[in-house]
Image: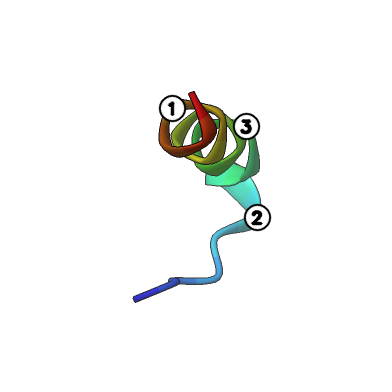
Amino acid sequence: MHIPRHHNNLLEKWVLVDIIL
C-alpha cells in the first residue's frame, strides 16, 4: 500500500520511522 508521492516523501519517511519504532 505504498503510493508514490514526491511531495510526501518526508511524510512517508516519518511513517517508516513510526513503524520501525
Question: Which residue extends farthest left?
Answer: 1
Residue 18: quarter of image: top left
Is disc 3 surrounded by few (<14), some (14 to 19) or many (20+) residues within 10 Å?
few
Foreground label between 3 and 1: 1
SS type, badge 2: helix
Between disc 2 and disc 3, the foreground one is: 3
Q: Give the quarter of the figure containing the N terminus.
A: bottom left
Residue drawn where x is 45% and y is 36% of the image: 15
Category of crowding for the residue at label 1, using alpha-carbon neighbours closer than 10 angstroms: few (below 14), some (14–19), many (at least 20): few
Look at label 1 and name its amino acid.
Answer: Asp
Task: Give the residue pinned by disc 1.
Answer: 18
On screen, residue 20 above or below 4: above
Of marks 3 and 1, which one's residue comes earlier in the chain?
3
Q: Position of residue 3 (x, y in %)?
A: 44, 71
- In the image, residue 5 lies at what x, y percent? 54, 60
* Tag 1 near tag 2, CB within 8 Å: no
Residue at the image point whose x is 43% and y is 38% from the top: 19
Q: Position of residue 10 (x, y in %)?
A: 62, 32
Residue that numbered label 2 is attached to = 6
Mark 3: amino acid: Leu
What's the residue at 53%, 35% (across, down)?
A: 20
Q: Secondary structure at mark 1?
A: helix
Write the residue at 55% across / 70% down: 4
Total marks in image: 3
Cα separation between marks 3 and 1:
12 Å
Residue marked by disc 3: 10
Disc 2 to disc 3, C-alpha distance: 9 Å
